Structures are given as C-alpha cells and as structure tokens.
Amino acid sequence: MRKLRLEPPFFEIGPKNYLFGDQILDLARIADEAAAKYDVRVIFTTPYANIEKVAASAKNLKVFAPHMDDIPVGRGLACILGESLRAAGAVGVMLNHAERALPLSTLVRALARARELELMTIVCADSIAETRAVAQLSPDLMITEPAELIGSGQACDMTYVRQSIDAVMGINPDIGVLVGGGISSGEDVYRTIMAGADATGSSSGIAKAADPGAMVWEMLSALRQAWDDRMAAEGKK
C-alpha cells in the first residue's frame, strides 16, 4: 500500500458541532480561499452531513471525516463506512480524537480499513506516551494535543511541542506532526510552527471566534509566515 503524504506546512480546521449547515459551507469557502492565497495545505474535518457539499465546492481543501468505523460493506446500522466516506468525497479520516477515543485493537483495524481504501489517516494522541504508542502504528499524520487543553483557548507550552515532535521523529520521521490543543490566535499558530511542528489546527478557536472567517485568515497567514521564517532560519529558503 502506498504511503500517503501531505507536505508541510498544513493546518487542520475542525468545526465539530459548533457549526452546521450553511455555516460549515461558508467557513469551508473562506478556508479554501485562504489556502490558495497562502499556499498551505488545509485539512477540513467536516461533520458527515456536509462532506459531499464541502468536497464538491472546495478546490484547495483536503476534506476529512471526523471518524470511521472498522466495518466492511454490509451490516452495521448507524456505523460509518469507509466506502461511503470516499463516495461522498472525503480523502481522509481522523481517528482516535479525545472525544471519539478508540481501543487499540479497534484503532488498528480502522487504520487497516482506511489504508485499503487509500484514505489518508490523521490519528490523535493526548499525551507524550500515547504519541509514542500511536507513532508505532505509522499513520500518515498525527495530531498530538493534551486532552485538557482541547477547547480551552490555552495553547500547550513549547516544551510539549518539541517533546511531541521528538517522540514521533524518533519512531517514524515520515509521519506529519500536527501539534494542537487550545490554538486560538495567529500568535499561537506562529509559536507552534516556529517550535518545530509541521502543522497545527483549531476547532473552537475558529468556530467560536467573533468572526470565524477572519480568524481563519489570521491563522493561515500566521502559518505561512512562521513556516517561511523557520525555513529561512534553518537555511532552507
């Protein structure tokens, strides 16, 4: 099975259930425009009901589903079938978020199903220890964020960012690493990328902002600036 790769810098926007219907489509449209302007890869993890419309309307977003079950085609009422996600236009799936945590055996099976379908995988971990464990499974991408900071508006400290990156790189340097949790401003984005992350992302920091669209522009601008500054400092640009 080929390795799926998303080149950094990238950013994940996950409105969860803070937004719905046309609110999701409006946010996706803005994210699509900002992704093109700043030349960054944007994962848009949309509620299931909006996958098809977002995928059909967005040119520059990587549309992900927020979960997928490890089931084959057939029985499984109310379960999330990978084939259905692909048919709706999703190119990837998020697994093991703190709000939808999976037992290890289930996560392993879900990853296997996603790989069969060539759906990109981004797997969440909520501690350094879990980050090391998940990295052993070789997902395409990882989100590492302390569970207590999710939705808190308080970003993790830079020591955690560096420890997370070192934990993953020490096991599999091909995994793209997104460090999140409490990202609520462009400054949070800038600091996280400058600390060495390939990416960061935001859910409530965008969805609950006074102007979610303006916050998308602020964060993606900061991502682009931080990546360019870091590459220049490392002599890579």
Image (tube, helix red, strand yellow):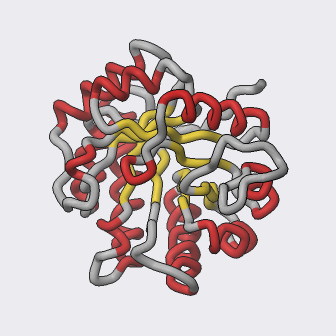
All told, the count of numbered labels is 0
Q: Position of residue 152 (x, y in %)?
A: 20, 60
Name the residue located 20 percent from the left edge and 61 percent from the top edge. 153
Q: Position of residue 43 (x, y in %)?
A: 55, 54
Q: Position of residue 98 (x, y in %)?
A: 37, 47
Direction from residue 235 to residue 68 in the image, left or right: right
Name the residue located 79 percent from the left edge and 43 percent from the top edge. 72
Can you say whether 236 is above or below 40 in the image?
Answer: above
- Return the residue found at the far bottom: 22
Direction from residue 155 to residue 83 in the image, left or right: right
Direction from residue 157 to residue 19 in the image, left or right: right
Residue 126 sits in which quadrant? top left
Q: Nearer the viewer, residue 134 or 234?
A: 134
Name the residue located 69 percent from the left edge and 39 percent from the top edge. 114
Q: Nearer the viewer, residue 91 or 8?
A: 91
Can you say whether 201 is above or below 208 in the image?
Answer: above
Residue 230 sits in which quadrant? top left
| Quarter of the picture holding the N terminus | top right
Q: Nearer the viewer, residue 24 or 16?
A: 16
Can you say whether 179 is above or below 233 in the image?
Answer: below
Name the residue located 66 percent from the left edge and 56 percent from the top edge. 79
| Quarter of the picture holding the C terminus | top left
Can you say whether 123 is above or below 190 in the image?
Answer: above
Q: Position of residue 134 (x, y in %)?
A: 45, 26
